[in-house]
Amino acid sequence: MTPEAARYLEKACKCLSHARATLDIGLSNDAGRNAYLAAFHAAQAFIFEQTGKIAKTHSGVRSEFARLAKEAPRLEKSFSTFLAHAYTLKAVADYETGPGSDIPLERSAAALETATRFVDGIAGMLGEE
């Protein structure tokens, strides 16, 4: 694994840790945002390892990951969809106000569970290459 990919995975693991801690104290918006960011950084690691390039935007990471993941049979097919849908957690946490601006705890918990599988799957795959 390249040093750059390893740094992205390290960042992903920190985001997972922050998501767990904030979920444990009921900060659902922070947990949801960090669950998304964990998957986002793991996707960046995967993209860098495959292409040697850095995708600089959220939409760029999502589209490039979806394209590359089609060629990676060991990755769960749901990861591309999760990355796209989980971005809404970040958007709600960062930008929404008023009714609907709080992510339900169960939604953040589910996102954290999937993000953990996402990061573990990418780390396992890159560690084997």
Image (cartoon, rainbow, N blue to C red):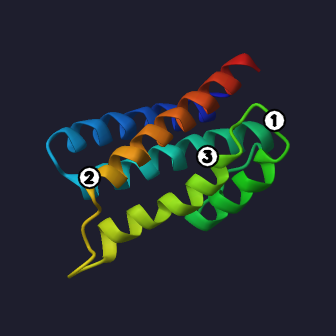
Q: Is residue 1 visible?
A: no
Which residue is at 60% across, 27% downward?
123
At mark 3, the secondary structure is: helix
Q: Residue at x 69, y 26 (%)?
A: 126
Compute the Cα span from label 1 to label 3.
18 Å
**Which of 5 and 67 lies nearest the eye of the viewer?**
67
Q: Amino acid at mark 2?
A: Leu
Q: State which mark lies toward you, 2 or 3.
A: 2
Q: Residue furthest right?
A: 71
**Type of amino acid under label 3:** Gln
Residue designated by label 1: 73
Q: Earlier in the sequence, mark 1 or mark 3?
A: 3
Residue 108 percent across, percent down from the top left: 34, 51
- Tell me: 96 left or right of 121: left
Q: Which mark is residue 105?
A: 2
Amino acid residing under circle 1: Pro
Counting residues from the start of the chain, the first of labels 2 and 3 encountered is: 3
State yes or no: discs 1 and 3 in contact (Cβ < 8 Å).
no
In the image, taking residue 90 as reference, residue 59 lies left or right, namely right
Q: Mark 2 falls on what kind of element?
A: helix
Question: How far across and down, in percent of the image, does residue 117 sit?
Answer: 53, 33
* Residue with the mark numbered 3: 44
